[in-house]
Image: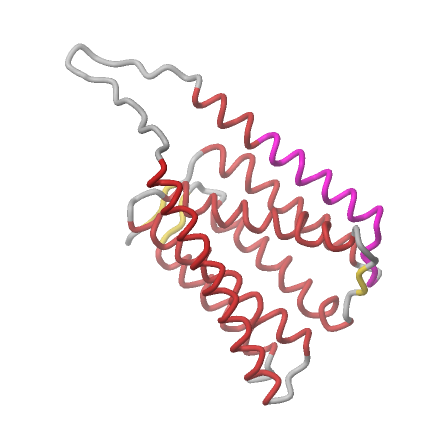
Amino acid sequence: GRRMKLTYELIHVDLPLLIGSAFLLAVTIWDGIFSFPEALLCLAGIILYLLYTINTRKKYENIEIKKGPNEEVKQGRKLDWKTLVILAVSAFFIYLGAKYTVESVIKLSEIFNIGKEIIAISAVALGTSLPELMVTIAAAKKGKPEMAVGNILGSNIFNALAVMGIPALIGTLIIPHSILTFGLPMMLIATLLYFFITHDKEVTKWEGWLLVIFYVFFIGKLFSLF
């Protein structure tokens, strides 16, 4: 079946960092309170991760490509204004798409009298993840699994450390009981499942379906469908 091959860096660096960020988040919110010192700890983690990412990129940029007698060295394309405009326009429409998706689903949820934490853990998460899903699918179709998986790992690390850490600098966050008893355990299980699926440096088609089935199970339990 179809499968995605993963690089050493993703498996031995980014994947452990994903697990570490997930469990760090779990430890800091376990008491139902996410305080200012805990926010600083998470932000320190994301700063270290960003510094590592920048350093790794520089390391690969400095690697000289050896060329054979009949090979030509490909010159990197320079960043021009057209690329910047396309990037800016794409980012704008991604923002609009996620914004209106979240607003529409929230309104529907309010009509059906669904709790805010359930909205956040399902509708908001889905809406904000749709752009990432599109980027990941596009990367996979172009035969760039490292970009697809790297997007997933980097996004989740950033969410666990920065998206939680920055708001807590303004004020202490109170974590709802339902998040602690259901959302958090499910996140940890999903993280471990992802680890065991990818630790052999590839993701097969049936493993992808396993992750989709797990998410369907998560949504079903969340809305008490089974």
Magenta stretch in the rendered image: 32-52
Can you give x and y, in whole percent of width and height, for residue 9 in the image? 49, 33
Residue at 40%, 49% (x, y): give it.
Answer: 203
152 or 76, nearer to the observer: 76
The structure residue drawn at horizontal position 40% and vertical position 41%, both measured from the top left corner, is 84
43 to the left or right of 83: right
Give above or below for 83 relative to 130. above
x, y (%) of residue 136? 40, 52
Camera sees residue 226: no
- Residue 49 included in the magenta stretch of the image: yes
Q: How is the image coloured?
A: secondary structure
Q: Identify the residue at image location x=57%, y=65%.
A: 125
Tell me if I can see residue 202 in this picture: yes
122 is within the stretch colored magenta: no
Q: Is residue 34 above or below residue 55?
A: below
Residue 130 shown left or right of residue 83 in the figure? right
Q: How many marks?
A: 0
Residue 127: give x, y in percent of width and height: 51, 67
In this image, 172 relative to 137: left or right?
right
Residue at position x 81%, y 48% in the image = 38
| The N terminus lies in quadrant | bottom left
Locate the C terminus by quadrant. bottom right
Place residue 221 in its image quadrant: bottom right
Apparent side of residue 2 relative to residue 61 in the rendered image (left or right): left
Image coordinates for residue 116, horizontal then vertical, percent? 68, 77
The chief SS type of the magenta part is helix
Outermost residue, top direction?
69
- The residue at the far left in this view is 70
In this rendered view, identify the residue nearer to me: 168 or 85.
Answer: 85
